[in-house]
Amino acid sequence: MDGCFSKTTSTVQALTLLGRFEKLNIPRLNIEDKYAKILHQYGDEVEEIRKLYQKHREDPPIPRNMPPVAGKVTWVRQLAQKIEDPMKIFMVYLQVAVLIRHPNEQDLLVNFDPYIFEVIKEAEYMMKLDLEIPDAAKVLVHSRDKLKSFHSQMLLLLEENNSLRAEIPSIFTTLLGPSLKKVDIALRPGLISHTWTSLSLPSYFEQVKESLNELKIVVKQVNDIKVIRIDNMLKEISETLLCDLPERTPWTVEEFLQKMEAYCKEMALEINKMSQVVEDAVKELVRIFLHKAHVIEEPVEEENTLTLEVDCKFKF
């Protein structure tokens, strides 16, 4: 690949060759590095064209057998063509979907070439020199701030999507499938129909934000219930002592039996209260998952209530 690029003599040739290699989807070709070098090469070419134009604009070289005026016009058009052709190729990279999937991990990625902003700088520079640029490039220059805003918004939305999914406990991933699917549906047009020049991008961002906000609420709900009302309660139950021993003075057997029976009854009530909190939390989780799945919930039978009975009778 490097050998092929060393033989190219212009930005257009280099871009065309790179496009062919990119279609091969061969890993480790360092495509982005090549784009950076091509863009740098393009900047050098524009600078050389500027110097050439400044040097000969009063008396440009005229092709053989061509009238003076027509020859001057032809010379200017040839210079403009050298600038416009690479610009048109760079512009193609804005007519792509705003999202792509990673070929291996299937994660969503923002489909934006950062060198587009360098192309905008080149176009602005050319406009300052009163050089003609394609109409699409003019639109791009005037839309620079909007394009930067779109790029930033898309990055933030994907970051929030990945962050929310990372907060979901693995045991809830399947149960939250309907909520996750809603986010996937909202994001899907970014893989297919929305490009960086689409007029509908703002409304697309709003739809994605809305679906992410709904997911954020339900993830916080289930995480709070799991941590505070289930995990903490189970931890407290596991740490509950079922045997109370004297601190200083030893007990007789009768005292031990009496105190232990009273203590066990007390702890049994406490454990039953905590187990009831856990059960209520699980029921609430079930209601949340059913609601998000749009399933009609059946009433929970009271006889299924979880209780814990402790036998406080001791036999010797």
Image (cartoon, helix red, strand yellow):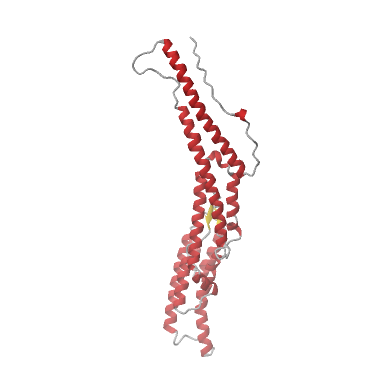
Q: 272 or 294: nearer the eye?
A: 272
Residue at the outermost top position: 316
Residue at horizontal 45 percent and vertical 17 percent from the top: 260
Q: Is residue 295 left or right of residue 35?
A: right
Q: Position of residue 301 (x, y in %)?
A: 63, 31
Question: Horizontal and vertical percent for residue 234?
Answer: 49, 31
Q: Residue at x 52, y 27 (%)?
A: 272
User: Which residue sits furthest left?
Assistant: 248
User: What is the number of callouts on the image?
Assistant: 0
User: Quick check: can you spot residue 63?
Assistant: no
Classify 225 as above or below 99. above
In the picture shown, does residue 159 fall above or below 286?
A: below
Q: Is residue 155 visible?
A: yes
Q: Vertical placement of 301 versus 42: above or below? A: above
Q: Nearer the viewer, residue 9 or 206?
A: 206
Residue at (36, 13) in percent of width and height: 250
Judged left or right of residue 139, residue 248 is left
- The image position of residue 56, as x and y in percent, is 44, 84
Residue 207: give x, y in percent of width and height: 57, 56
- Residue at 58% across, 43% down: 176
